[in-house]
């Protein structure tokens, strides 16, 4: 009887479950959205229990759609929104608060104070990250500083912390396993990516009790087994876990140094495989663990861009100048240019390479002739400009050449975007035949973890290119456009300085 891999992709706005067969093809895909909570400006929260329900519902739907029963699952892989932080009462499944989402900026002041204390370099050299509200560590510190009941429980050893993967693993195993993988641990500001351990100095700086933290294991291998009482009456190995962007790098078969992918969704995340070498950046790139596999650690450079596809959603939901996000690419192509308009979508501050949580969205170059179509095109072009910002630095800081970008994510369906990005960077762009590379990466890690697939070469042979984009047009013209973008960014950054 054929066996299958279930991939659970727990994202920022919804949970996707997919069933994969032995040849790497997808048999089904079910996505279930859940509510976003915005209790204060700049705050973003999720309900952990609602996320858990969407996992069960999407998994059940994906298996039904694929025409299989739970006993035909060989393994489960999990990939997740990474820095989002969940807290629950140790030994129970009771969340102590809503999850604090990676987009949440409530710990901005904590980051500013720690920078003023001269702590940023300490964090950077140990974690490869910058002091920013994006990461889990300052979210935990905010909870400890602002919730006396939470703080008391935490210091008594009665609180468990986890990124979303840890929460799901804990629930799936019926509370038996509190763990995470190297890739997710490396996004917390508490995990030393050189010693591969929770770092006592960093924990002390943040005031975080070690008792809260999960165990850390390689990304591929058996973490535990589903509790039949929690998961459709079956015990299935959970044998692959990786943060969503690292999973996408794995799913894109970027297994050699220099291979690079860009996932374009709510935000855009560019990752370059740097092999067994942790490349540190002085220019705003993050150094992160891509995955742990076969007793080896693979590292990556990352450019985390917070708002790309979300800017298109903003045009739809707040300005209401488009009906569907899918219209953006077609409308952008309907005009020859933006008419000199630039849109810097710093709607929640700016991520890489600027790392300014106080920057604000800026639209410059508006004239009497500016139309709705020009603004939409500017929003689409901003995705490409922000991507080039990080690619230029990656090549410079790593000394590694990039020959092509493998693009995935919902926004990458726009041919106009990928062609514009190719023209802007002078690089080839390849879009895979299976767009859900994040879920595919989780499935591949899970399958390799139990011997469902034998090695990376077998996985690599399954990757297929659906569309290929090469540079056309005038490079000089694109450089002039990019220079205009850099001036627009300067305006957005001035806001945080009160100018």
Image (cartoon, rainbow, N blue to C red):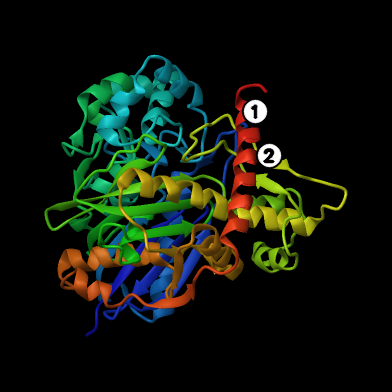
**Mark 2 crowd level (few <14, some 14–19, many ≥20, 10 Å Cα):** some
Q: Could you say which quadrant of the image residue 117 lies in?
A: top left
* Quarter of the image with the C terminus in it: top right
Residue drawn at (47%, 39%) of the image: 353
Residue 157 lies, in percent from the top left, at 25, 26
Residue 267 lies, in percent from the top left, at 52, 50
Instruction: Give the total number of marks visible in the rendering.
Output: 2
Q: Could you say which quadrant of the image residue 286 lies in?
A: top left
Residue 147 lies, in percent from the top left, at 44, 21
Q: Are marks 2 and 1 in contact (CB under 8 Å)?
A: yes
Residue drawn at (33%, 75%) of the image: 463
Q: Compare residues 233 and 32 and report the one nearer the observer.
A: 32
SS for dot 2: strand
Q: Compare residues 249 and 480 and report the one nearer the observer.
A: 480
Residue 407 lies, in percent from the top left, at 45, 64
Furthest toward the bottom, the residue is 1
Q: Is residue 177 left or right of residue 111?
A: left
Residue 495, numbered label: 1
Of the image marks 2 and 1, the number of the one nearer the N terminus: 2
Q: Is residue 383 left or right of residue 400?
A: right
| Residue on which disc 2 sits | 362
**Mark 1 crowd level (few <14, some 14–19, many ≥20, 10 Å Cα):** some
* Quarter of the image with the N terminus in it: bottom left
Residue drawn at (65%, 21%) of the image: 498
SS for dot 1: helix
Q: Compare residues 235 and 364 and report the one nearer the observer.
A: 364
């Amino acid at each position: 009887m054929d066996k299958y891999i279930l991939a659970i992709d727990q994202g920022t706005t919804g949970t996707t479950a997919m069933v994969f067969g032995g040849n790497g093809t997808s048999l089904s895909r079910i996505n279930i959205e859940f509510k976003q909570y915005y209790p204060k400006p700049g705050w973003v929260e999720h309900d952990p229990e609602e996320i858990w329900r969407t996992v069960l519902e999407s998994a059940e739907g994906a298996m039904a759609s694929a025409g299989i029963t739970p006993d035909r699952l060989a393994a489960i892989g999990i990939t997740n929104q990474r820095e989002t932080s969940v807290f629950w009462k140790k030994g129970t499944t009771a969340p102590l608060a809503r999850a604090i989402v990676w987009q949440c900026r409530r710990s901005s002041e904590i980051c500013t104070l720690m920078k003023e204390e001269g702590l940023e370099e300490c964090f950077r050299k140990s974690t490869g990250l910058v002091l920013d509200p994006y990461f889990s560590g300052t979210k935990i510190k905010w909870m400890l500083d602002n919730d006396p009941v939470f703080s008391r429980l935490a210091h008594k050893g009665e609180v468990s912390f986890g990124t979303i993967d840890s929460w799901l693993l804990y629930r799936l195993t019926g509370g038996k396993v509190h763990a995470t993988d190297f890739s997710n641990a490396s996004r917390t500001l508490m995990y030393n990516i050189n010693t591969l351990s929770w770092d006592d100095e960093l924990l002390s700086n943040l005031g975080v009790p070690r008792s809260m933290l999960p165990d850390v294991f390689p990304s591929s291998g058996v973490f535990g087994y589903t509790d039949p009482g929690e998961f459709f009456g079956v015990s299935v190995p959970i044998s692959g876990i990786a943060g969503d962007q690292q999973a996408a790098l794995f799913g894109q078969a970027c297994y050699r140094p220099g291979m690079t992918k860009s996932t374009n969704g709510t935000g855009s995340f560019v990752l370059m495989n740097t092999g067994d070498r942790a490349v540190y950046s002085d220019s705003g790139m993050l150094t992160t663990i891509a995955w742990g596999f076969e007793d080896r650690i693979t590292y990556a450079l990352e450019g985390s861009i917070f708002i790309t596809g979300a800017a298109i959603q903003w045009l739809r939901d707040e300005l209401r100048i488009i009906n569907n996000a899918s219209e953006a690419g077609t409308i952008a192509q309907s005009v020859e240019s933006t008419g000199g308009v630039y849109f810097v979508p710093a709607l929640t501050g700016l991520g890489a390479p600027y790392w300014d949580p106080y920057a604000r969205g800026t639209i410059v170059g508006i004239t009497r002739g500016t139309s709705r179509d020009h603004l939409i095109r500017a929003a689409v072009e901003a995705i490409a400009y922000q991507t080039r910002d990080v690619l230029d630095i990656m090549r410079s800081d790593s000394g590694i050449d990039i020959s092509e970008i493998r693009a995935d994510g919902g926004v990458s369906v726009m041919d106009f975007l990928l062609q514009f990005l190719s023209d802007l960077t002078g690089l080839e762009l390849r879009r895979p035949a299976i767009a859900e590379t994040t879920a595919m990466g989780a499935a591949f890690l899970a399958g390799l973890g139990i011997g469902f697939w034998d090695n990376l070469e077998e996985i690599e042979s399954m990757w297929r290119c659906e569309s290929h984009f090469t540079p056309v047009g005038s490079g000089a013209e694109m450089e002039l456009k990019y220079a205009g973008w850099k001036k627009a960014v300067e305006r957005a950054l001035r806001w945080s300085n009160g100018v």
